[in-house]
Every structure is written in C-alpha cells, then in structure tokens.
Amino acid sequence: MLKEIRIAGFGGQGVILSAHILGRAVSIHEGGFATMTQNYGPEARGGAASAALVISDQPVLFPYVSNPDILVVMSQEAFTRYTPELKEGGVLIVEEDLVRMENVPQHIKVYSIPATRFAEELGKKMVLNVVMVGFFCAITEAVSYDACRKAVIDSVPEKFQKLNLDAFENGYGFGKNLLAKGPSKEEDTEPVSVLESAS
Amino acid sequence: MSTTADLHIHNPVEDVLRKERIPTIWCPGCGIGTTVNSFAAALLGQDIDLKKTAIVSGIGCSGRVSGYMALDSFHTTHGRAIPFATGLKLANPELNVIVYSGDGDLTSIGGNHLIHAARRNMDIMVVCVNNMIYAMTGGQAAATTPGNSITTTSPFGSFEPEICLPQLVDAAGAVFVARWTAYHVKQLERTMAKALKKKGFRFIEVLTPCPTLYQRRNNMGDGLAAMVDYKNRSKIRNGAPTYEVALEPGGEIVVGEFVDREREDYLTRMRRQLGTNYSELPPQPEEEEQEGCCSSC
Amino acid sequence: MMHADPNCVLTGTHFMNGDAACCEGAIAAGARFAAGYPITPSTEVVERFAARVPKIGGIFIQMEDELAASITLQGMVWAGAKSFTVTSGPGYSLMMEHIGFAAMTETPCVFVNVQRGGPSTGLPTLPAQGDMMQARFGSHGDYSTISLVPNSPQECFSLTVKAFNLAEKFRVPVMFMMDECVGHMTEKVVIPDAKEIEVTPRRHASKPPSEFLLFEPGEELVPEMAHAGEGYKVYVTGLTHDKRGYPLMNPASQKELIPRLFEKISRAADELTIVESEGLEDADVVVVSYGITSRVAQRAIEMARAKGLKVGKLRLICVWPFPEKLIRELAPKVKALVMPELNMGQVVIELERCAGGQCKVISVPHPGGTVHKPADILAAIERGAQ
C-alpha cells in the first residue's frame, strides 16, 4: 500500500528529522520502502520547512508528493498552504497550539495534539517533533510502534535517548487515547485534560 | 648538442636539466633561461632530495620551464599551476613543490589562486618570471605591463596601471617575498636557495627582458641593453616595505628580499587545529562507530 | 583486485540521502582527498567528506573556485591519491578545461555533477538532466570519457565506487551525473562489508624509471602511471605529447595520441554497456531513460502495461559511451523508442542516430525543476505503439 505523507512547519521544529525517523522506521525496521524529499529554499532558518515521505511495500518510483494521504502541520502557514492539497478523505494531524484551524474541509479527518506543550513538560521544547512522531504512529498505523521506537533510538544521540523515547511514548499514548474517542473537532480540544490523560 | 658532449664540457647545472629537451624554445636575449640557470644552481647547491622535488608550470614562455627540469615536471593549464601544486603538496607533504611560471599566467588568469595560496600559506615556492608581456601569444599587454608601453593590444600605449606583485603577495600573507632581475644572477641564486629551504608560501619575482616582443616595440634595445638598464635602475633594498617597491616606467627598480617571516603553513595549522580529529592512518577496528546519516540529512 | 578498507567503510543499513551516499561511495572506493567549492545542490557531498576524512588520513580542501578545485584534485592524483571533486551546473562549466586536461593527461579521477536546472544560475535547488551533452562534449577538443547516472541514493553509493574503479581502469575522468532529486532524496542505503566492495588499484608503473615511458600504451591501450616523488621524473603536459610525455606538436603525434584516447574506451564498449532492461524481447515500445527519470518512466511503463501495451524498459546506467550496439539491435525490433529526459532533448539525439530510422524515436523533453508526470510519458508510449 503506497502512502504519501507531508510534514510541514517552520525551521527549527525538527520537521525534517521527524520525516527521517518515520522513513527510517519503514525502510530499515519494517523492511518496506520509503523515499523522503524536502523543500529547499534560500531561507536557512526560521522559514517554512517541509518534508515529504512516500512509503510503500513496493519500491517507490515517483519521489514527490503533491496530494498527500496524511498531512502533519506544525505551523499556521503550513496549515494554510498544504491543507488544500490533502487527498479526499485524508488525515490531517495538527499541532493544536500553533494552528488555528479555519475552513477545514468536511472530507478530512483531523487529529490534534498540543505537542509543544508535551515537549515543554519534558523539559525540552525541541522534542516536539518526536512527540509528533509518536502521535503520528498511533493515529495512522502507517508504521508500527516497534519500528518507530527503534528509529527514534537510532536517530538521536545516546544522551538524549530517554528524553526522546519519553516524547515518543507521550505522543503515542495521547494518540491511542484520542483514537478511542474518535477524531477531534476544533471546538472540543481541551488542552489541560489532554496533558493529564497522557501522563 | 652532441658537440658539447664530445668536447666533455660539463655544464655545472646539467644534472637537473632534461638535456634531451635542449635547446629551449626561448628567443636569443630572453631572460627566462638566465633565471633557470640560477634556479638549477640553487637546487644543486642545496641538500634537497631531487627525487622528491616537483616543478609545476602554467602556460606561456615561462610555463615551459617545468619541462626542461629533470624533476617531476607538470605543465598544467593556463593560470592553474598553483592549485595543481597545492594538490601535489596536500596528497604528498614530503614533496618540495615549486611553481615556475610567468606573470600573465600567475598574476592575471591565475591571480586568484596566487592570493589564496599565499593566504593559506601553502608550503610551495613560486617563481614568477615577469617579462611584463604576454610573450607566447605574441606580445599583448599584461597586468604587469608598465604604463604607456606599446603592445599588440595597446598599439597607442597601455593606459592601465600595473600590479605590484610583492605588495600583493605580502598583503595576502606570503612568508617570503623577493624580487631580482635577470641581471642579478648570483643574488637570485642565493635567494632561491634560501627560499627552497623555507617553509610556507614563498614568492620570488624575477624581472626579465623580452627583447622580441617588449623591448623591441618600446625602443629599449636588445637583451644586453636590458641588462644595462636593470643594472642602472636597480636599487637593492632588503627588507623594504613592499608598498615602496612598485615599478614605475623608467623609474627605480627596487630589488632584494623584502619579506622573510614565520607563519604556520597550511598543513601544520591543519594538524594543530584538527588535533585528535586528524589521523594519518585510519582508526583500527573497534574504535568508535560513526553514525551514518543524521549529520548530513 | 583489491577491496575497500574495512576501517573506513560505513558498513550497515542507513537512511541516507544521495549526496551522503556518494560521499560514502568515494570513501569506500579509496578516495581520501578531494578539492571542492560550495554549490547547491552538491555541497552536502563535500561537507560530509570534510567531516569524515581527517580521521582516516585524508584531506578535503575548499578551493577559491571550481577552476582551482578541478585541477587541485589532479595534483592530488599525480601525488598518488585517489581524488575527486563535486559540483553542479555553473561550477561544472568552469571545470570543463580541466576535464579536458584530465582526459589528455590520462589522470584517473571522478567529477561528480549534481545536476540542477539551467542554463546559468537557473534552478539551484531543483533537478534537471541538462548537462548530459556537456558531460560528453563539454571540454574543447576531442576526447572520450565515461558518464554514470544513478537513480537512487543506493546507486549514489554503489555507482560512485564504480566510477572510481572505471577511472582507474581506463585512466579517464569519469563523470558521475547525479541530479538534485537523487542527491537530496533520502532512502535506505545498504553499505556492504568492505570485503564485498571491489576497488580497482592504480595501474602503477611496473618497470623501473630507466625503462619506463609514462605514456606508453599498456594493457588495454592504457598506460601505467608513476607519481611525483617516486624517482620517475614524470613529464605531464596538456600539450600533445609522445610516449615519454614530452610535447610533440605535429599531425603524426596527434594521430598517435588522440585516437588511442577514444579507442581505449570504444574497445571496451561491451563492458561499458551498463544498462537495466526488462521486457525488451516482445516489446512494441521501449522506454529508454536514465537517472531519476527512469523511475518515473517505470511508473508510466506499468500504467501502459495495465492498458495492455507491450512496453519494455531500458535504463542507461552508463550513458557515455552510449550503448550503440544495443540500440542498433533493438531499433528494428520495435515500433518506437521513447526517451524522457529532464532536458529539452539531449541524449535522444544519440538515440535517434543509433536507431538509424529503423523505428520511431519519441523525445519527451522537460525543462527541469521537477520530474515528468508519468502521464506525459504514457502519452508518448501510446503514440509510439500506434
């Protein structure tokens, strides 16, 4: 099954690394195929960052993603720019504190997580991308928990392993809880209870 | 050639020349051969392993020097002798690497490399034979052509100021900078000998006559007249600040060893700064494993 | 045949981009020296090399421009090293003179070109295959060389090793023609055990200096090489030269030297026919492609087969020398050859020449910046099948 994924946010959020972890999980730890591409702009830092990942059980032929099955957005700009590209019935994963959702098409399924707050709780805002990876893993099941966890381990320096695994678990746990409740709507995100339920 | 051998006359520098390549292509009265004689004498007078000595030239009359020397000879592309020499030195630091080329080659088309090799203090010696003209191509104006000279591309007199090479390489960081003329054969030999033994970027400018294409068109007489001119106009000023040595048409020719200082050369500095990050040999097995991708992805 | 140095090869399974894989391929092939100049989208190769090689006895030097980089690497080679440089469009143009110098002086080395949209500054961060003719004919004068084109990060590793090996075998500058898409694309890359990586050693002088001629054609018309500092007093010049390497500028010496530079490649035509093919036997249409375009072409081929068309695939891994014999044999058996390229039609000129009017040759040009839409290639296949 071929799945096209886009992860977008702004520079410094670890957008590329999160796609890297997922690609690694699929292609190395699950024996599937993954092709990651990223957008390069003249802006080095702080601008928009976006990575595309095509995963499949067959070799990936066409490397680019124009209409993703799954879109992960971590900034307002990314939401505005990429949401219209989502496939009919696609999945939108949102960093809910950084994105105010407007005009969300009816056909897509939306899952939100306050990933930055999770990361801050762990003491390092930087790991929000790994929280997102955990959440992505739980929600989409495009890649297995085990493979993803392994990919997290081999993508981060050893001294940050525990921190990143905690971030991954938090995102994953939150995702599983949310799935039990069903896709979120804009109005029913309750950030405070969210943090409690995850820990 | 055979007559010379038959008479058992031994040229004192023939051991470092490719005798089978001689006679040279240079014109009568040309000063390049004179500099080569000084260079060959300097090489032989030193405790230098000639098997570990490479000579690199670019293109032009002086670019042919590398091919007359019985060393490892590299006749490269126009202007690029210095970067080629850089590659030789880096991949085999044991080599003595000498760049021998002309003014147009080294300072105009190759000017950028000259600046950066001096800046890096690459451990090479550069001999720049300055005949103030593009000679191989028939006498066109160069960056070194004195103002108001007649050349084939400045038939009414050149009106560009000439570059002052000692000042340029001094500013860029050369550790040794000297200038002589083809008249100063002994001084040149001594300076070359000294430079051969020094580490770092060394630059020697030698003014030479081009009777065929420069002297003649500018009513300056033949090669001998040029020697007289050099003798009369030269003033030896060792240690002179290089901003005082610019050449003026008809003016004083300041010669001597202008700069002789110590500065860490490229490879020494590289090794010092890299510290434990540099190893001449690959690490032996079981040492730290490198992470494969994150640094670059 | 030698093998890669196990202490330097990053054996394992990686998720790595093409630029990084190319760097690892160079290291596995034995390159410890490189000279470069930064240019998008190739810079990651030398960035990685600069971080990797100091610990394994190598040096990367960033030169003042591409003219310098492309000749510094040749100084390194003549000092005994395996060396390469990496660049993209504008830098590649600047390197042309030294590609000719390497061809003339038979300096084994590798030029990596991560192709981007052009001409001029063009599209620095987006792919194209617009330098394919330049790879073949870019330097002045007549010479023959080898161009390999990878279509995945995995091949950026394995074909870089091959590029170095061919450079040593034939003593030519080998062009490694990546593109931005392949260079920046991240996929699984398996780097085998060092003892599974074959490395071609230099054809080093087998005779003592007194008997050795630096440019005497040896086995397979390729001379042996001696390095600076070994006592051979080598004479290397970009001028037309005799067997000693001495300049000898006349029609006879030119005739002795230049045709040999061609023949050492052309007589190895079979060995250098490096392709990947599938379904050629009963195909009505064969899609001939190379590099990243071959992957998109594969999708178009699958779409066409789903429609019941008999379509074959021929992917050129070695584009230069062009697999002339193969095309001459194939052309009379098919209705059409379809060639998509990320340029306005370059290698298709050679395809058309070799097809010799025996079948239709359909070019699917693309100015670059992205890859083809499979549908565009499919349309050409359908046209060819009519």
Image: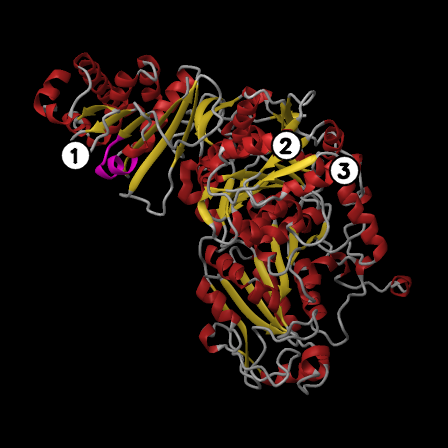
Q: Secondary structure at mark 2?
A: helix
* A128 in relation to C147, above or below: above
How far apart are the two marked residues, 2 and 1, measured between alpha carbons?
51 Å
* B223 in relation to A180, above or below: below
Q: Of the numbered discs in the image, which one, if any, rests on residue A100?
A: 1
Residue B86 magenta-highlighted:
no
Q: Which of these two is toward me, C126 or C224?
A: C126
Report the residue that reaches farthest toward the front.
Answer: C386
Question: Magenta span covers which residues?
Answer: A73-82
* Amino acid type, label 1: Arg
Q: Position of residue B141 (x, y in %)?
A: 61, 76
How far apart are the two marked residues, 3 and 2, measured between alpha carbons?
31 Å
Q: Quadrant of residue A12?
A: top left
Q: Which residue is mark 2?
A: C384
Residue A77 magenta-highlighted:
yes
Q: Position of residue A119 (x, y in %)?
A: 18, 27
Which residue is at a point 68% across and 36% down the rendered structure image?
C360
* Amino acid type, label 3: Ser
Q: Secondary structure at mark 1?
A: loop
Which residue is at a point 49% across and 26% down the rendered structure image?
A61
* C24 in relation to B234, above or below: above
Q: Which of these two is toward me, B5 or B219?
A: B219
Mark 3 surroundings: few (<14), some (14-19) or many (≥20) residues within 10 A: some
